[in-house]
Amino acid sequence: MPLEAKNLSFRYERGLPLVLENIDFKIEAGEVLALFAPSGYGKTTLAKLLAGYLRPCSGEILLNGAPLPEKGVCPVQLISQHPEKAINPRWRLKKVLEESGELREDMLSAFGIEKAWLERFPRELSGGELQRFCVARALLSGAEYLICDEISTMLDVITQAQIWSVVLSEARKRNMGIIAVTHNMHLARRIAHRVFDLEKREYI
Amino acid sequence: MIQKNETLLEIHDLSVSFRMYDATLEQKELQVISNLHLRVRPGEVVAVAGSSGSGKSLLASAILGILPSNASVSGHLHYKGRELNSQLQKELRASKIALVPQSVNFLDPLMRIGPQADGHKKPYPTEKRREIFASLGLDERVEKLYPFQLSGGMARRVLVSTALISEAELIVADEPTPGMSLSQALHALKMFRALADEGKAVILITHDIDLAFGFADRVAVFYAGTTVETAPAEDFCTGPEALRHPYSKALWRALPQNGFEPIEGFQPYAGSLPQGCLFAPRCPMATDKCRCEKPPVQDIRGGEVRCFYAT
Ligand SMILES: Nc1ncnc2c1ncn2[C@@H]1O[C@H](COP(=O)(O)OP(=O)(O)OP(=O)(O)O)[C@@H](O)[C@H]1O
Ligand SMILES: Nc1ncnc2c1ncn2[C@@H]1O[C@H](COP(=O)(O)OP(=O)(O)OP(=O)(O)O)[C@@H](O)[C@H]1O
Ligand code: SF4
Ligand SMILES: [Mg+2]
Ligand SMILES: [Mg+2]
């Protein structure tokens, strides 16, 4: 079940320059790929295209040879670089989790999510607590591919290592593909099978 | 000349708690910062590292006087010897203390980036703003954009620029570097260092500890609402053998370049803190004494540590 971008181009508005131009890119099920490029280069844009939040201006995105489904939970889930923008600020966290699938206790404890947090609003958690919550939510959704857009920058290094170990072991169990956007080459080398440099368009 | 022993910001025995309603709608006090001490002198970059949810951002909010209304604060905060009450906080926020917020939601969604970055210094000489922007890799095109049109790292660089433009005496930077490339992050830290060298001061809250150690004078390590160790930054560059607290050592070892080996478990929940040492449930060296009594702050080898067995 590969996920691929074919000859993908994108601009945000007519008249603005292309952010992505003729991108070709492929990841296999079970693969962990790190995505590397300078800030502002288009990593998040590519992530949003792959997860179906944006539509390409030209080119296509194929999951197992077919376009992404239009309805239902997207099999490609994006964990945003800014968790505080990815959650409805007026919902308690319990409601947020209920929306995205079954509430699995083992998953909550693997991410150090306290029961009491579920009664809170997103602004009542720390940056890293909210980030952990978003990662758990994405895993609970049963996705086939997970796009992790800088998911560990808001975490202390111990929690980073823990979170990645849970995500990677869950990925192995389910043969899930992972695209990890990161500026940290040390981290990329620890977690990924391959590192793709979007600027040079090559695997490094 | 700046006097190194003069104090800019003094925090003594700070505690912060929230009035919360639990699932049974019973009102409870949740204490999230306890008995915290921190001193910042002119000329210093003090890095604040530590556990996710340990109270770093709330400390920043407490200094600036922008905690949510259901928070209560006790303890003493002094700025240049004056008690830091809400009146003084309001004055200082307008000119002397700048915050680099952790959340990009702090940006005003309806205001273009250029004027927004000028802040209270408006109208700021465009040339100087452009110089700061350019040094962080933000080109002139960015001035005309709205926040939603920025990438994550660009937004972060705008927030850092805003603090640099403010010419504040104290910058409280809460996670200034996520989303930046390595070279941009190093550059931002270098600019903070330069400000400190001019006699200003920076509190640098960061998880990018490997980068911060090279620019900070001292590092305070937070865990479950208080500092477990405050030590010269050199000790963190040297490695675990130079550090005093088991949690600081564990942090160092978990860096991707140093092993990526996490210790088990998570920081205890503020609503059910252990009776003795806050780190005891995860500490490989914990004894019965650790589980019953709270270790006091001790001075060891030029650093402060809360551990009975620190050497
Ligand atoms: N909604 C938008 N409208 C217009 N331009 C946008 C929008 N979102 C992003 N851009 C622009 O697209 C480019 C790529 O942004 P993107 O967020 O994909 O970068 P990135 O590689 O994820 O960067 P970072 O590492 O800083 O997060 C940037 O120049 C940005 O200004
Ligand atoms: N409004 C609130 N109500 C209740 N608890 C809160 C509130 N805001 C923060 N907390 C709790 O206080 C603790 C400290 O939060 P803070 O945001 O200061 O953490 P932090 O050290 O900045 O963490 P991070 O590294 O994840 O940003 C967290 O456990 C958080 O859940
Ligand atoms: S006081 Fe005891 S439990 Fe706490 S850090 Fe020291 S050895 Fe570990
Ligand atoms: Mg991005
Ligand atoms: Mg924080």
Image: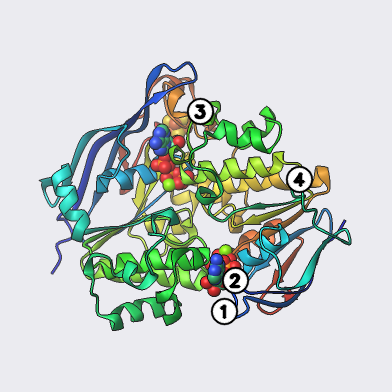
Residues marked 3 and 1, same chain: yes
Residue B133 at x, y percent in the picture: 38, 76
Q: Which chain contains the residue that carries disc 2? A: A
Q: Are marks 4 and 2 on the same chain?
A: yes
Q: Are marks 1 and 4 on the same chain?
A: yes
Q: Is residue B170 left or right of residue B106?
A: left
What residue type is disc 4 on? Gly
* Residue closer to the observer: B42 or A131: A131
Q: Circle 4 sits in a helix, a strand or a loop, which is it? A: loop
Q: Quadrant of the N terminus of chain A?
A: bottom right
Question: 10 Å neighbourhood of mark 2: few (<14), some, or many (≥20)?
Answer: some
Label 3 to label 1: alpha-carbon separation: 43 Å
Ligand 1 picture quarter = bottom right
* Residue positioned 30% across, 35% down in the render: B69
First reached walking from the N terminus: tag 3 or tag 2 = 2
Q: Using the image, tell me which numbered label, if any, was put on residue A119.
A: 3
